[in-house]
Image (tube, helix red, strand yellow):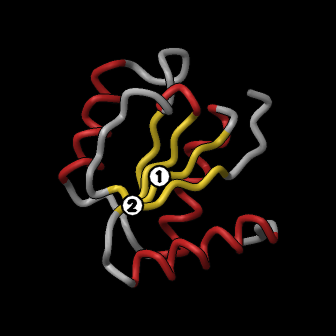
Amino acid sequence: RATTGKCNALVQLLRDLLQRGQGKALVFVERVAVAYPLARILGAAIGREISHVCGVQGMDEATRQQTLRRFKSGPSDVLVATASLEEGLDVPSCKYVVRYDFFAS
């Protein structure tokens, strides 16, 4: 499987952070089309459950809420999300936030 250097760097960063066992990580992406594939790539490379969540255009509310619950208190260690999730998310166990893409705003 071919991935970019940027993706490989993210995999290594998340491996290092998660091995410390000090919290969960949130990875922001710009586009809905990137969230799911990146979550799958990261999950396969790291060997942990990686979830993804998108705004109202890319995911229904019930699925979004279930995914957020799994991230907040469940087995998911990393959440890949679009910027729609930036405000209003409170996860005390989330210690790391990564902006994977450049954001115009």
Per the model, the C-alpha gap separating discs 2 and 1 is 8 Å
User: On the rendered image, what quadrant is the C terminus found in?
Assistant: top right
The amino acid on which the numbered mark 1 sits, given as a three-letter code, is Leu
Q: Assess disc 1: are there few (<14), some (14-19) or many (≥20) residues with their C-alpha within 10 Å of its C-alpha.
A: many
Query: Of the residues tagged 2 and 1, which is closer to the observer?
Result: 2
Image quadrant in which you'd find residue 63: top left
Relative height, residue 5 to residue 64 (above, below): below
Relative height, residue 62 to residue 70 (above, below): above
Horizontal arrangement in the rendering, residue 81 relative to residue 4 (left or right):
left
**In front: 100, or 62?**
100
Residue 24 at what x, y percent from top left?
36, 62
Q: Are marks 2 and 1 in contact (CB under 8 Å)?
A: no
Residue shown at 71% from the left, 65% from the top: 7
**In front: 5, or 99?**
99
Which residue carries the number 2 mark? 95
Q: What mark, if any, has residue 102 been given in the picture?
A: none
First in sequence, mark 2 or 1: give its number: 1
Residue 29 at what x, y percent from top left?
64, 42
Q: What mark, if any, has residue 26 been given in the picture?
A: 1
Residue shown at 52% from the left, 40% from the top: 81
Horizontal arrangement in the rendering, residue 72 relative to residue 101 (left or right):
left
Q: Residue furthest left?
A: 73
User: On the rendered image, what quadrant is the N terminus found in?
Assistant: bottom right
Q: How many marks?
A: 2
The residue tagged with tag 1: helix, strand or loop? strand
The residue tagged with tag 2: helix, strand or loop? strand
Residue 101 at what x, y percent from top left?
73, 46
The amino acid on which the numbered mark 2 sits, given as a three-letter code, is Lys
